[in-house]
Image (cartoon, rainbow, N blue to C red):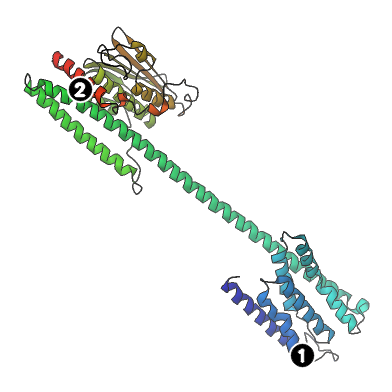
Amino acid sequence: MSRRNAIIDAGLGLVAFALSVGVLAADGFGTPDARVRHLDALGVLLAAVSALPLAARRVAPLTVGAVTIAASALLYRLGYAFDLPLGPAVAVYTIGLTCGGDPRPARRRLAVLATVAFAPVVAAAYAARGEDVGAILVPELVGLLAASAALGLAGDRTRLRRERIAGLEERAQRAEREAERERRLAAAEERTRIARELHDSAGHAINVILVQAGAARLLYERDPASSLRAIATIEEVALDTIGEIDKLVRALREDTGAPPAPPPDASALEDLVRQHRQSGLEVDAHLAVPGELVPRSVAWAAYRILQEALTNAARHGRGAASVAARYAAGAVEITVTNPVVAGRAGSARASPGEVAPAAATAGGGHGVVGMRERATLLGGTLSTAVEHGVFRLHVSLPVGRSPGSAAKNAPPSGPSGAAENGPESGTGGGTDRAETGSDTASARGEAA
């Protein structure tokens, strides 16, 4: 029991004792009966016993009820005008409040017995005093019994209401905890997504820098101007990458707001094509995607897939690519074709000089797996093929379907854990990457 409840109960006992003594001193309510016993020391003592134990009513409700009822019965037996039995009334209410829902059956039965015991005890006290209980006191005893039962029932209803309120509060707190947990999970998933985007962005930028560095090295003596342009492109790409890494790392922190929004419309595709043209890749692009009709998720996936495809064209192709993007039949269709260098058409794991067109047709390296994963998560499809030395990639991203609607039934496209970590996404082995960059740079230098 808290200190506050102890003080309240002690004050309640003192108030009940004072009122009881006042009623006894006035010889009850109404016209005093000549046979009534006037207040004396014994009356004050019994009044104290009938009221002051209320200070412990929360600790031992049944004991307090028994003591207050017995003291009240003695006051009636000795002839005092005890017309206001406050102690027994509060004790009966407390019994209903604290013992009505007790899991022990014996204690519940004692609670019910204590609730209805006051009236029979008073009747026995009047009978011991020589009163004609049957003829005179029946209405009064019936009223006492009804009042006692009502107090016990009121206490039990109060207990049920408090339990219901406590249950509602617990459910509200549990719902709040669940909401907070869901918020934290959503934040963790968002940070994971941002980390993957950081991985993709840095990987693609490093590939571009690698190709341009190889071109600058080869063209340094033959074409200094082109070499300087390649170095300027390296600087520009490095600065852009640093800025993007800074934004994404800020978004990964706990104390930041929402992460950077994905590209909202098709203008981002045009910017991407322009960046690859500046890096030295010859891109023939036909873009007809209305940005107002494309959701942000589809625009973001299209951006990343085209970025991956153009990066692969720069790494494994002959320095040229053709891009066609359009919106038709409720879907964004993107087709990328580029001539490939012999020995680079197959899997990224193939050794230099080995031709493996079947692997590319089936899905190729892990970069293709990552692109297919992005497409299937949005309910789209992605296909690749190599014919007559030309690599062709086609992706369809539906606009009106929910994410993951086709991912459940899509065939496996490769090791899921390698979808974003393979050599095609810019984080492969250093030997393959260096060889690829050197070969591509050599081809570009020869073309220049």
Quadrant in the picture for the N terminus: bottom right
Residue 209, position in %: x, y?
Answer: 20, 28
Left or right of 402 on screen, residue 25: right
Q: Residue 185 lies in what quarter of the image?
A: top left
Q: Is residue 373 above or below residue 54?
A: above
Q: Is residue 15 left or right of residue 287?
A: right
Say which mark, if any, is on residue 42: 1
Residue visible at 13% across and 24% down in the picture? 216
Q: Is residue 323 left or right of residue 362?
A: left
**Category of crowding for the residue at label 2, using alpha-carbon neighbours closer than 10 angstroms: few (below 14), some (14–19), many (at least 20):** some
Say how many tags the image has.
2
Q: Position of residue 135 (x, y in %)?
A: 93, 78
* Number of the front mark, 2 or 1: 1
Instruction: Name the residue at 29% across, 20% down.
Output: 287
Looking at the rendered structure, which numbered label has been put on residue 277?
2
Residue drawn at x 50%, y 22% as measured from the top left: 409
- Residue 365 at what x, y percent from top left? 34, 20
Q: Secondary structure at mark 1?
A: helix
Specify the amino acid type for callout 1: Leu
Q: Is residue 387 above or below residue 16?
A: above
Quarter of the image where one finds residue 314: top left
**Apparent side of residue 360 relative to residue 228 in the rendered image (left or right):** right
Q: In the depicted view, which residue is nearer to us: 264 or 129?
A: 129
Q: Residue at 20% x, 26% y: name it.
A: 210
